[in-house]
Image (spheres, rainbow, N blue to C red):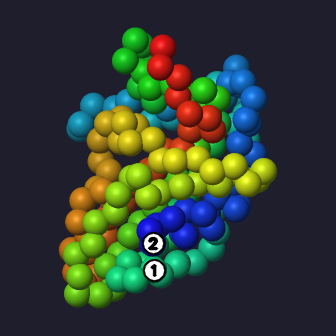
Amino acid sequence: MGALLVLAMAACWLSAIALGGRPSNAPTREAASPSASPRLTPAGAAPSATAPAGAFQDGPLEFTVDKVECGVTQLGEGFLAWRPNGQFCLVAVTARDVDSAAPQLRSSDQYGFDSAGGRHTADFAARLYEPGETIWRPVSPGSSTARSASTFPSRPRSNG
């Protein structure tokens, strides 16, 4: 629930999620091998988005939005690529445990909001295309951090 507030606030700064069709000139995020980091292949200008400044605390966790990247039309390559019905907005978040608890986030409780007030649920399966993410694991007490690029499709994915 805590990250809901953070991601909702971060999403307020999202200035452009195209709720229409997939833009043909948007960048594509390719899946990386476990030894490499994910890379972005630009195919033109993507909508701009800005992350809020500063950290937000909810319960034992303090969140910082590090980066917001919209206009991503697929994760991975080829027939295994993961495609939204529009575009993905990737929100890179750092969570730090400022208490003695070891909380764990659930992707089903993470939402992003677009400039029109539409709510978008984090795409659970997209984490398979982000090999270095650790946000969904328990956050160790103290000053440990976890990072993730939570993925929000602009519209629900179709089954086909």
- Find the distance from the CA under tag 1 to the CA under tag 2: 5 Å
Dividing the picture into quadrants, the one containing residue 117 is: bottom right
The residue located at (38%, 78%) in the rendering is: 61
Q: Residue 66 carries which label?
A: none
Residue 137, position as x, y percentages in the image? 24, 59
Q: Is residue 101 left or right of residue 58?
A: left
Q: Which of 69 and 157 is in front in this view?
A: 157
Q: Examine the image and state in which quarter residue 81 appears.
A: top left
Residue carrying label 1: 58
- Residue lying at 49% horizontally and 71% vertically, measured from the top left: 64
Q: Residue at x 44, y 68 (%)?
A: 1
Which quarter of the figure has residue 2?
bottom left
User: For this view, does 158 lie left or right of residue 14?
Assistant: left
Relative to 88, does residue 118 appear above or below in the rendering? below
Q: Position of residue 111 (x, y in %)?
A: 53, 55
Q: Do the residues labelled 1 and 2 touch (CB within 8 Å)?
A: yes
**Mark 1: few/some/many CA within 10 Å (<14, 14-19, 20+):** some
User: Residue 34 at what x, y percent from top left?
Assistant: 24, 37
Q: Is residue 65 visible?
A: no
Tag 2: Cα neighbours inside 10 Å, few (<14), some, or many (≥20)?
some
In this view of the protein, which residue sits in the foreground, 155 or 100? 155
Judged from the image, the secondary structure of the residue bearing numbered disc 1 is strand
Horizontally, residue 127 falls left or right of residue 6, namely left
Q: What residue type is labelled 1?
A: Asp
Sequence-first tag of 1 and 2: 2
Please give the residue where the numbered disc 2 appears in the rendered image.
2
Residue farthest toward the bottom in the current orientation of the protein = 99
Residue at the image point whose x is 54% and y is 69% from the top:
6
SS for dot 2: helix
**Three-letter code, disc 2:** Gly
Q: How many labels does the image show?
A: 2
